[in-house]
Amino acid sequence: MVDIAHRTAINPASTNDATAARGLHAAPLIPVESIDVRQWQALAARAVEPNGYYLPGWELAVSATARGRTDASALAAFDGARLIGLMPVVSLRQAWKIPLPALVSAHPYGTLCSPLLDRESAVEASSRLLQRAREAGAQALILRDVALDGDAMNSLNQVLDRDGLKPRVLTSYIRASLDATADGETLLREALGAKKLKELRRQRHRLEQHGPVTFEVARKPEEIGPALETFLQLEASGWKGARGTALVQHAGDAAFVRRAVLALAETAQCEIVTLRAGAIPAAAGIVLRHQDRAFFFKLGIDENFAKYSPGVQLTLDLTRHLCADPAIASADSTASADHPMINPIWRGRFAIGDVLIPLRRNDPVVALIHAALAGLNTAHEAARQVIRRLRK
């Protein structure tokens, strides 16, 4: 049995001449920072399924400094010199301290790990990524937080069905999304109803007592830096700050998000939205953009304004903003199941889950990996229930 936990990802630049002549094709695992960013960006533009969290500006920043997510490698698929598939990964030992031969999709500080697959050759890219995982010594591949009915998973399923391999869904839940092709006002009226909207308008009028309420969108690099600092301050001022989980409270996380937001602003793939009462920021959120989809990453509020529902007010304005943008067709809430704030507003739904993919037929090691992950999920759920009771 090969334990990939101790394998070293090969940098193509350090291989011998014969291997180096084959470039990135030579190594089954490569450091994400070794990937040509222009090739990566080109693949992202052609991807069969958008994933803002696997854009190079975001993932490279995560891998460089983000807490618990540094030093990711990648499975890369090529058609000649053309990059057609990319999946950042870590070993099962790195992900969950389980010393079994499997690779796990690297978690990009956002709840979506659908790989980037070229829409013109998505099935072939899927096949080559799975082969790269085998060459790396893995006997299984675990996809975390993948859209179960998305185009990327559908392409992988075609390869697995062809090869007689059956994926196993480990966990799943239903997540809120927004159909941004609808009229914003109509969507909100149908989602919330006249009575709830009237109450929210009353709260907004009360918020206006602190100054005119405005909704701001920062996109340009010179605008987005100050807007990000406003967001970081708001996030740290609330319950996340009290628990020590705000981004700015960890040097690595703060460095990652500052680098990532500025990098994506350069390619018009990030914006920060802010709701102000006069000069005072009441709420702010980070939104990523990839192809025709937006991703609502995080929200921060000033809890001094909590009785006016500033997070909901910001989300209402964000909904109108996205629905009015012809470049955006949908938005992923990237929220947990049954999220109390976003679920009543964004009424679209899709299935998200963790999937265990065997890489060889009838491999008994896959059963061991499955059992270890099932035990881990049981332990995590028990811990979550204890935490919920303590918070109550």
Image (cartoon, grey):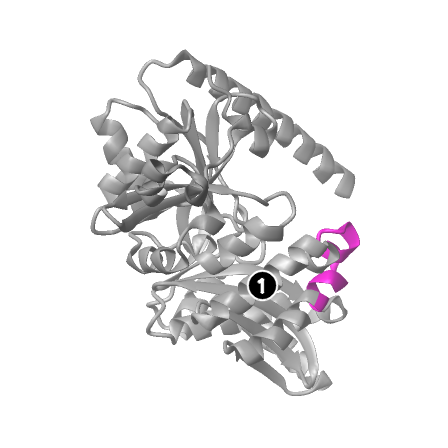
Tell me where residue 258 sits by quadrant.
bottom right
In front: 344, or 160?
160
In front: 349, or 103?
103
Screen quadrant of the C terminus: top right
When the figure is inspected, residue 276 is found, relative to residue 331, above or below; the finding is below
Task: Quickly name the residue at label 1.
Answer: 259
**Residue 145 % position (x, y):** 47, 42
Magenta segment: 233-245
Bin the neighbour count of mark 1 within 10 Å (Cα to Cα): few under 14, some 14-19, many 20 and up. some
Tell me where residue 355 sits by quadrant.
top left
The amino acid marked with disc number 1 is Arg
When the figure is inspected, residue 261 is found, relative to residue 73, above or below; the finding is below
Total numbered labels placed on residues in the image: 1
**Residue 148 % position (x, y):** 37, 40
**Residue 51 % position (x, y):** 41, 54
**Is residue 95 shown left or right of residue 120?**
right
State the SS at label 1: helix
In front: 318, or 348?
318
